[in-house]
Amino acid sequence: MFNDAAAVFTVAASGAVAPSSVTFDNSDENYEISAILDGTETSVIKMGSKSATLSGVNTYGGGTILAGGFLTVGSTANLPAGPLTFQGGILRFTGTPPSSLGAYDVNWDSFSGGLELTSGTLTLADAISGGGSLSKSGAGTLVLSGANSFRGGTAVNAGFLRMNHAHALGAGDVAVAVGGQVDLTGNLTVTNAVSIKGVGATSSGEGAIRSVNGTTNTWSGPVTIAENSARIGCTGGGLLEVSGVINSGANVYEVVVRMPNDTGGTLLLSANNTWLGSTWIRCGTIKLGIDHALPTGSVLRLGLGAGQTGVTNSTLDLAGFNQSIAGVTDVGTDNLHTVTNTEETPSTLTINNTAAYTFAGEFTGNLDVVKTGSSTLTLSGVSSTSGGLTVSNGNLVVSTSGSLGSNSTNITVAAGTLTLQNSAALADEASLRIADGGGAKVNLAAGVNESVGYLYFGDKLRMGGTYGATGSGARILDDEHFSGSGILTVRHGNGGTLIRLQ
């Protein structure tokens, strides 16, 4: 037996040694064994929390028991074929691992332990059962292809764990640590509960759980965000549906979606999720599968990030559903930032912001936008939505570069203020409705001469002409409904059509 009482922790011999068994029970020091372990009945037992490294070309035939710590080998030359029993220990390959453990007689019914792969790929095709657990560490890839039923849970501490079967993770919970990643390979529905930290194992950080190679998969178990800015994603234009509830417990943690710049991908959310932080779409698409799939208190952030460059599109697709959020803003100036509805069924986006935000992206599709909340939302992008805009509270500013687009023709100011800072903010044939008696106003900045088709105060259609606050120079002065020094030109009304000569 080798334990922590030894004075020398490197063991060498001039020839092969063949004891009946070799036991390493070390929790304070690591052992290195360069001697050749021989003997048809000789077994190796690893106990304790530290490592024992076998570097000899071993030929012992009595099997290997991993009861604790790490048994470290460079290749299968150091670990001869025979019985291989996992009882809580970890088998560590520092070189290229075998493609499988088929050369070893593994008792998969009582498996409990782990594999650390520095590089390469190792596949476990047998079904793992029993009450044990499985851990994966190291930068390499562990592939699970069996219909596993082990109950002790799975820990992905580093590198890649690839699922080739819906039940690859057994019946227990899954924990993905910083630097770990679970890849779903196609047409899988995973029911396990999972907690995730970090951005994944790839250099670009495409998610701690993700669909790979353009495939479609579903994660139906609950997902816990266990660290701020944990990521979920896809590769190759694939789709990952998360139908389990994504939560962050009592922690205010942001959820980040990051797809590859060149291929994108879609995260479909079909549960009423409850995480407490913001939602950041760095690249790719979040698509709704239910009303309010995003937490209604979440701020939507779109873009690759400050100072980041790349050909990226960041999109929220309401897909015929409705969504309330606590704000929308840009993170960086890369390419397109879009909130859209790609379905024929109308969608409504309600922005209930109590802090000020600026959004330089665009609203598109059959989408109604409702501004609530007491603070200011500034729109500086050019939109093309065919839906309407309603201001119910606070101040919605269409900046000097912004426009609601020519297709958005139903504009309502029910309360609060709509501020127009350029003369092309609204469609020329838009119908503008301003509520009576509730403090609703349109603020027209200096130099603005905006045109609309029709003007209503409450339900009453007003006559054509020019409108503005006192001092604006408009023909019809109205300080109840207007402020600022700009002018609103109403092209049609209950008195006919106004023709403005240029």
Image (tube, grey):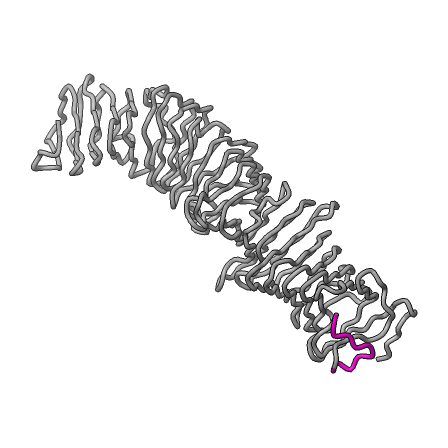
Residue 405 lies in the magenta stretch: no
Image quarter hosting the C terminus: bottom right
**In the foreground, 127 or 254:** 254
> Relative to 106, does residue 4 appear above or below in the rendering?
below
184 left or right of 409?
left
Taking the spot 40% from the left edge, 34% from the top edge, the residue there is 142
295 left or right of 1?
right
Taking the spot 45% from the left edge, 43% from the top edge, the residue there is 249
Overall secondary structure of the magenta section: loop
Q: Locate residue 239, reporting x and y percent.
A: 58, 41
Image quarter hosting the N terminus: top left
Report which quarter residue 449 is drawn in. Answer: bottom right
**In the foreground, 31 or 477:** 477
Q: How many marks?
A: 0
Report which quarter residue 124 is drawn in. Answer: top left
Task: Find the magenta span and give its range.
Answer: 471-480
